[in-house]
Amino acid sequence: MGNPCYECPLPVAIPPEKPFLESVKLGIKETLFPDDPFRQFKNQPASRKFILAMQYFVPILDWAPRYTLELFKADLIAGITIASLAVPQGISYASLASLPPIIGLYSSFVPPLVYAMLGSSKDLAVGTVAVASLLISSMLGKEVNPNENAKLYVQLAFTATFFSGVFQATLGFLRLGFIVDFLSHATIVGFMGGAATVVCLQQLKGILGLVHFSHGTDLVSVMRSVFSQTHQWRWESGVLGCCFLFFLVLTRYVSKRKPCLFWINAMAPLIFQVIGNLKKGLNPVSVSELAFASPYLGTAIKTGIITGVIALAEGVAVGRSFAMFKNYHIDGNKEMIAFGMMNIAGSCTSCYLTTGPFSRTAVNFNAGCKTAGSNIVMAAAVMVTLLFLTPLFHYVPVVVLSSIIIAAMLGLIDYEAAIGLWKVDKCDFVVCMSAYIGVVFGSVETGLIIAVAISLLRMLLSVARPRTFLLGNIPNSMIFRSIDQYPVANNVPGVLILQIDTPIYFANANYLRERISRWIYEEEEKLKSTGGSILQYVILDLSAVGSTDTSGISMFKEVKKNIDRRGLKLVLANPRSEVIKKLGKSKFIESIGQEWIYLTVGEAVAACNFKLHASKSNNQVADELDAHNNV
Amino acid sequence: MGNPCYECPLPVAIPPEKPFLESVKLGIKETLFPDDPFRQFKNQPASRKFILAMQYFVPILDWAPRYTLELFKADLIAGITIASLAVPQGISYASLASLPPIIGLYSSFVPPLVYAMLGSSKDLAVGTVAVASLLISSMLGKEVNPNENAKLYVQLAFTATFFSGVFQATLGFLRLGFIVDFLSHATIVGFMGGAATVVCLQQLKGILGLVHFSHGTDLVSVMRSVFSQTHQWRWESGVLGCCFLFFLVLTRYVSKRKPCLFWINAMAPLIFQVIGNLKKGLNPVSVSELAFASPYLGTAIKTGIITGVIALAEGVAVGRSFAMFKNYHIDGNKEMIAFGMMNIAGSCTSCYLTTGPFSRTAVNFNAGCKTAGSNIVMAAAVMVTLLFLTPLFHYVPVVVLSSIIIAAMLGLIDYEAAIGLWKVDKCDFVVCMSAYIGVVFGSVETGLIIAVAISLLRMLLSVARPRTFLLGNIPNSMIFRSIDQYPVANNVPGVLILQIDTPIYFANANYLRERISRWIYEEEEKLKSTGGSILQYVILDLSAVGSTDTSGISMFKEVKKNIDRRGLKLVLANPRSEVIKKLGKSKFIESIGQEWIYLTVGEAVAACNFKLHASKSNNQVADELDAHNNV
């Protein structure tokens, strides 16, 4: 019968074979260097390349020479503003991590300096974060009691910070930053909300003035601990705490309604001088404190890696968001190296885990920062505090600290985002809620692991059970679309058109084979019961099948065998380059015949109709078609 | 400007919202019941439903009433043929599992009877398999020495078989059979080859007549064991073994060249009467032997689950292949229940793990079996052997056993399949080789775990790093295809058309955002350097984006913000139902404007060109277009 196609604009192309090594190189480049960080190095002399490389790895060399008084003025105001936030927050979060308050101040001195040299974000403000602080106290606190064995506990915290830094820098050097992407938005919303709830629950100790308290972080232990000693509650403490809390929430409300008054919220904690017994002087060196020989090294490494990932996820996301807002680009992997270096340096100078917290970065941005110079200003302000102002802090009841922490936490419970997830994507809502429930009723790690596992399972399931769609012809066009989505689309008599939705891999090849055979069976049954024309062609639309493997190729062979055995004909439409290459190499194209592979579904249907007409001597088909169109 | 589209055949449809519960129900049905096993139950009276359900769960009730003498004759011949294979194979494989040879015979009696009642394949012949036997001896042998503590070892083997059965039946009941699909074809080729190599290496003990031998299964330990005792080698044994091996390979070669002589190969092992000291009588009950209280219970469970999965993978794949060949359908999950039941029953009657081996099933099929009745005939023949013929077997050197095993194993090293993998898909070849190397140099589990991990990683990576393609217009058509695949396709001036290849999920949303921004940057640079028309529109072809989640929606919002900021316009083409639904719910459609979403890339381009012309008062664009077409 020859070529059945009356006007083929172009046959399906098999792209030219690339040399093996080149395709491997390309694959690695796309996987590890998707943002092409080296494009500026192309076609440059060696000396220029060296300067570019230095500027690439130490961005301060890039912007410092162009630093002006104008920029400095902006950075000065922003830096002092965030320093005023850094002092009370640093002290509160250190107490959340069960560490001495002064370590919170130390942590706002060295790490910002390191970040200012290595970081590429212009807006990020460095500091400690509540969630990581809580994680440190819950994970290390299980092994070593911070009250009974304070020295060892502090050593372990430094050691964990060191490993966080090493892990973060390693991820960055190996360009494996995409691991952070596996913490989905939904996971983070649920996890943050859960962690904030747990932190608030922990503050019941301070608010109620309790002396003994549960070591567990889950809701059940905390509630048991609170209600088993109702006679110990101190109402004075409770009233004071609630008043402070109300005041703090009010200032936030005001600064939210009138953004220009943001400083009210930022300054509010400063009104209360926070805590006493602070040692005067800068960060002591703590290299000798790193407890590599401790029997708890394993716990420290585990804590370091988990808190390191969480800190990275927050820091990188914050950096990216603000960079997008100001329309500049930051390299996630390079940021990781900067975070890693800053934590390694921090762990050697009595600091614990730092990253780029959202709240402080937002304040920095609002205050008009222009470069990472605002971090240097903040560090200088904290230095002045450490050298001269520590005697000004004197003892204030723990209840104030608790109120500050609760006020900060309430903003993290983002129920509006959770409602948004429910509206848009039920599955993401499930992920979010399981993270929340896992954290609140289990532990911080449990929640995280459950949420990541559900997210991954969903992704795997979407590959293992891809959807297949029945396509129909949209009237008065050559366009074929899913009948589910476009109910006006019409079946083509005698032809079954199926669209496959994802790459075909070993995990879904068996499913697809059975699903396609069920589609054919159901279509034949339907035609039998309605007395329509018999089925003659099965067209597979492969537009959405980006790639395949050998199991996928076997699937095609088996589907063809099955279709042949039923006396039907298999037709392929729009196979993509990866697929057609592999079909060619496995001789499938020869077995199906090049003339049964079309560029579009429209052409495939036209060819099938043409053959249907040609193969029937009488006009039966045409009558059927007419009858069909008249219905 | 109003509707920019001069002739839209149809706007993009947002499919009607389905009730939440209904969509969950549909999702579960597609995931767990893709083959719709209950379709025959629809619209039937209750009594008929009960009969159908009985026939569904116990297929023998379905076919036994229609059993004829004709069918019986065919099954009789096939059954006796496979029994002649079952006796020597059973004994050999039992010795491979370090179990007493009589257990191999027992295992060909009870399990086939159970399968004949519950199994839905007409061709599958039940029996023990080499790989699972080897796995049992290597996993249990690590804990308990089968020579020193034979009774405990046998008990553990029964216990492991019991747990295999429970695990298999559970998977089937829960409709989780797709877990088996995660063992890809490439994994199985590599794993089988590796296991066969290991088995052959183990036979060096028998061939060389060694007394002491390594307990490890890896190449290094075996070679060290063989060459450390060269003075113990017995050349008589070696010569005898090689002669037998040559004879067996020759018979296989003959039966392969002339398929009608297949029985020569099947019968060959029978010429040598195999081994002595067999007890007369049927299977003793072994329920009391199940060692649930043993300290090695954990090992037994682990062995049971791993061997159970391997056995399932072989049995289900074999059943499916032959069913497809004879054009009937078998339900994988129901088969799993049958396998599970047969192993539970087996573990209580002195049998160890059985499944549907490929070799025996192929012989059964060649011998013309018609129903599972051939399994009953085989069981009857084995029963006769057990009751009356065991005294006929007398002592024959172990070397013969070794030769039989090696001959059977050589067929499993499928180097041709490995070459095929290399040609068609390099990554599958890597999976295959890592399974092989892992098994040969590490252990059987190591190889399996490495291969599955690589396969999964590849799948995850293909989701995390989806490909994006630049589309161009195929001359003289409204068709747009990847310029990589169709080098004749032309760029459209002023318009950048990108195609995204997979569902957009949290794992790839960040990557896609950065990749799209790089595409735009590169296109602008290119246009700048060539002095072409400036970029005005970015069209995203979403034909291949089957679904998305909230991270994907955020990605769209950020891409739009980025594109707006550059002064360009974002246009979407062919969003699919899942995507358009979520875009609608998250108000993205309102923000982009319904008039910027088109049914096809062609329409989107036409609309962009129309606007380009309308927005420029002079004919600059038309000139450019002409100039471009003339190039």
Image: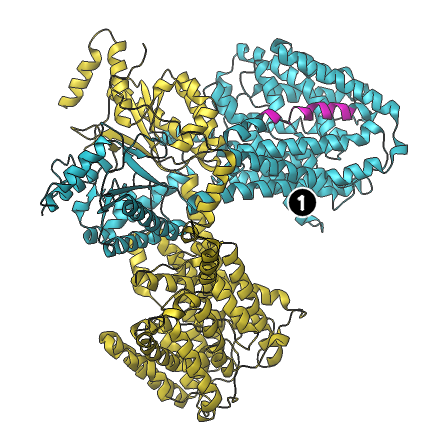
Chain colours: A yellow, B cyan
Q: Percent position (x, y) of residue B424? A: 50, 29
Confirm whether the magenta stretch covers residue B87.
no
Q: Relative to the observer, which residue lies in front, B489 or B283?
A: B489
Taking the view exactly as shown, the residue that stands out farthest to the right is B231
**Stretch in magenta:** B401-416
Q: Relative to the observer, which residue lies in front, A240 or B392?
A: A240
Confirm whether the magenta stretch covers residue B406.
yes
User: Above or below — where is B493 with respect to B369?
Assistant: below
What kind of residue is marked 1? Ala
User: Above or below — where is A307 with respect to B225?
Assistant: below
Task: Describe the element under mark 1 as helix, strand or loop.
Answer: helix
**Quarter holding residue B351:** top right
Q: Is residue B275 visible?
A: no
Q: Relative to the observer, which residue lies in front, B233 or A462?
A: B233
Count the numbered circles shown.
Answer: 1
Q: Chain of mark 1?
A: B
- Answer few, some or many: residues within 10 Å of disc 1's Cα (few below 14, many 20 plus, some between 14 and 19): many
**Quarter holding residue A209:** bottom left
Q: Percent position (x, y) of residue A557? A: 45, 23
Secondary structure mostly seen in the magenta stretch: helix
User: Above or below — where is A481 with respect to A52?
Assistant: above
Q: Relative to the observer, which residue lies in front, A433 or A191?
A: A191
Q: Percent position (x, y) of residue A265? A: 31, 80
Quickly name the residue at label 1.
B300
Q: Locate residue B434 relative to residue B540 in the image: left or right.
A: right
